[in-house]
Amino acid sequence: MILLALMAAALAFGADGELTPPMQAVVNHISADSLRGNLSFLSSDLLEGRGTPSRGLDLAAEFIASQFRRAGLDPAGDDGYFQTATLTLREPNPNGFEMTVTAGGKTLTIPAAETSILTDKPLSLENVPILAADHELPAADAAGKVIVWTGRGRRPNLPAGAAVVLFSSPKREVAFDPEASVRRPSLNTISSPELMALLKQAKDARVTLHVQPALDRAAKVRNVAGVLRGSDPALRDTYVMLTAHYDHLGMRATGDDRIYNGANDDGSGTVSVIEIAAALASMNPHPKRSILFVTFFGEELGLVGSRYYGRHPLEPLAKTIADLNLEQIGRTDDSDGPQVGTATVTGFDFSSLTGVLVEAGRLTGVKVYKSEKNSDPYFARSDNQALADLGVPAHTLGVAFDFPDYHGVGDEWPKIDYPNMQKVDRMVAVGLMRLASDEPPPRWNAANPAARKYLEAAQKLH
């Protein structure tokens, strides 16, 4: 029986390394020029970095909805193509702010615009030590000091005795869903090249810091969702999701170039969702299962949009067989070396979904592989995590884990490798066609201890 099933799959999805005519038609629909055109707008300066919330994010949402409408997708939100949410934003309080750093006979005044310090109570520090750190510090070294964290990657477990921990990164608001029972910890940031240079040169730096309690305000934000209804009466009420986040970091306070355009992160994933949606919508008949296309707000603030979706699913999670999330698929200049004709999947061994992508890659000339270094650690770093926590087999597919200009103002649309992105998107479309067929849904890998909690969530879900 297993052999017969494999033979049927081969006939439906290509044998001997060949695409079937329906697959070829979908593949031909995906265009590098179309991707370039959409991304050049979505990551343009006009949208001011698509911060959550912002006018630029709203413009991006309207643009995505217009493209879903153009493709003929059905609206899937609670307001047309939009799933609306109200977030409470904690913002730094500039009133009475003071920050001065002295070292080596120099005094540097840091303006409030270069910091984001969020506190529930007034903070007042007078002439305390401040130092830069890129590794975790012993309690004795951190006690009572202001620590400026310059390392990349995960947040450090610095001792609680530190007076304040500031992260060297763009200024950010902290958003939380008002339905959440616990507010996430404040993320304090600073973006001052002058301070970084001073701390590198001096070992005796001290800081005076006065900050008033943070201010809260409400803001409306939107996920954007469209659905391609399935053609099979028995399967059209089951769903495959293709997702990406359309927000980025917004704008920094100073500098000649102030806009975090976010072309690769994650404009590339967003325009790919648009492009693949249009290609699959051109099929007649449609795939057997329904395909739900969603772009999330607030990923850069901590998976806020996808977490909201998980609490308010637009289609039943028990009927959602898989989520493939697209992240950073436009740049091929990975820090570990060029990545041309390749794609990698987070949590590669966590479920059988990745096997579908490997086969789709074989048919389209894309090597879908496991990054031994990054696959598992990056599983929790994008919106797939929100769906996986609820039991839905969900992974993120990308090309470059780390690239020049990551979270920098230089992440702009001319640096994207559009022919390669076209190739990867074609592979994704072929994989989605298989996921949306009548083949058995993906399953979590019971033999992998790292997937156990997701398997248990799936068992509760079903």
Image: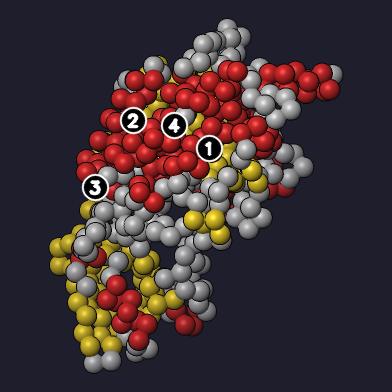
Quadrant of the drawing holding the N terminus: top right
- Disc on the earlier residue, 4 or 2: 4
Of tags 3 and 2, the one toward the viewer is 3
- Disc on the earlier residue, 3 or 2: 3
Q: Secondary structure at mark 2?
A: helix
Disc 4 vs disc 2: Cβ atoms closer than 8 Å?
no
- Mark 1, Cα crowd under 10 Å, few <14 / some 14-19 / many 20+, is many
The kind of residue on which mark 1 rests is Lys
- Disc on the earlier residue, 4 or 3: 4
Q: Which residue is farthest top?
A: 233
Q: Is residue 283 above or below residue 408?
A: above
Quadrant of the drawing holding the C terminus: top right
Query: Which residue matches tag 1?
Result: 423
Query: Which residue matches tag 2?
Result: 64
Disc 4 vs disc 1: Cβ atoms closer than 8 Å?
no
Of tags 4 and 3, the one toward the viewer is 4
Quadrant assignment, res 397: top right
The kind of residue on which mark 2 rests is Ile
Give me the residue at 22% from left, 88% from top: 106
Give me the residue at 21% from left, 62% from top: 256
